[in-house]
Image: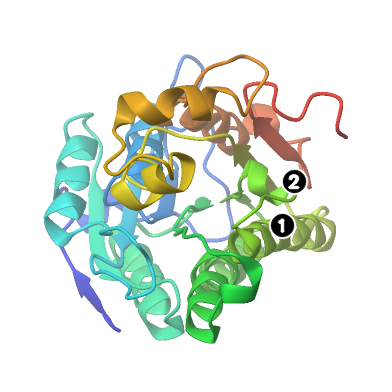
Amino acid sequence: MGSKRSDASGSKAEKKGKRGKAPKSVSGARPLDGRVAFITGAARGQGRSHAVALASEGADIIICDIAADIDTVPYPLGTDAELRETASLVEATGRSCLAMVADVRDTEALAAVVAAGLDTFGHIDICVANAGITGFSKFQDLDDQTWQDMIDVDLTGVFKTIRAVLPHMLERRYGRIVAVSSMAGRMGNPNLAHYVAAKWGVIGLVKTLAMETANKGITVNAVCPAAVDTPMLHNPAMYSLFCPELAEPTRDDVAPRYASMNRMGVPWLAPEEISRAVSFLCADDARATTGQVIEVSLGSSAGQH
């Protein structure tokens, strides 16, 4: 599946950090000045939002995306052009961005992204394992390939992403790891057994790794969003799931259905609302927060756990 490298702006000499030492915060600086963040699934949607948000807080950014479709996913995935657009948006904040095409299912491709990031910036302080897909099917109708693709991207892809950068963080005894799960990882959801299983698994992975790294300067947390205003949510296949009685349901048609799934009665969140939670977990102010699940859920889980 491979990877493809794009150049990051700025000289390598300016960006090389000292290994074995975490970047020091400077009084009056932005929370992530001196940091480097690696974000997967960043061609669009939440990944793009996280990249721009962390750059706005001062971090240089490494991004990757599959930039290709997967046959079992019922909507188009991000493209290389969208990945380059994310890089441009990051650079518009004044920070540097390294953008590469890589599939999170591909161990070698992720290793290449991390190696290129270290070569360009000298260190990686933050990992946001964001890449994910969704789809739907009755349990009994799930075929092997649809199940496997979901688990491979949404769970194994998170594992491989974190594993690619963890040795470097352990060496430096510093790291902020955030995995994007879902409110579907906190409860059952009809027609989404494979998605729920993967996102539930992400939470278990996060909690386990948090225990292993708690005394090594590394925090590991998960963010669980409710429905988010991204192409994963807004596509004909998803609309038909929520409005099966309509031939061609629209955004306006599905809005009340989405709103009914949470206590605030809001159909969906803006990606930036999730990014604010991610930014908090990536900052030193959250150094005592690890093994946690931050729900940005519009109250949908209130009274459940």
Across and down, in percent, residue 72 comes to 39, 73
Q: Is residue 297 or residue 211 the one in the foreground?
A: 297
- Residue drawn at x 49%, y 76% is 146
The reply, left or right, for residue 150 in relation to residue 10 is right
Q: Is residue 256 visible?
A: yes
Say above or below: 239 vs 200. Answer: above
Mark 1 highlights which residue? 200
- Residue drawn at x 65%, y 63% is 193
Mark 2 in CB contact with mark 1 (< 8 angstroms): yes
Give the amino acid at mark 1: Trp
Q: Is residue 119 or residue 89 the one in the foreground?
A: 89
Quadrant of the snapshot with the N terminus: bottom left
The reply, left or right, for residue 265 in relation to residue 113 is right
Across and down, in percent, residue 65 comes to 31, 62
Quadrant of the snapshot with the C terminus: top right
Residue 191 sits in quarter = bottom right
Mark 2 highlights which residue? 186
How would you rate the neighbour count of disc 1 (Cα within 10 Å): few for under 14, some for 14-19, many for 20 or more?
many
Separation of marks 2 and 1 at Cα, in angstroms? 6 Å
Say above or below: 20 vs 1. Answer: above
Across and down, in percent, residue 239 comes to 38, 42
- Residue drawn at x 35%, y 56% is 16
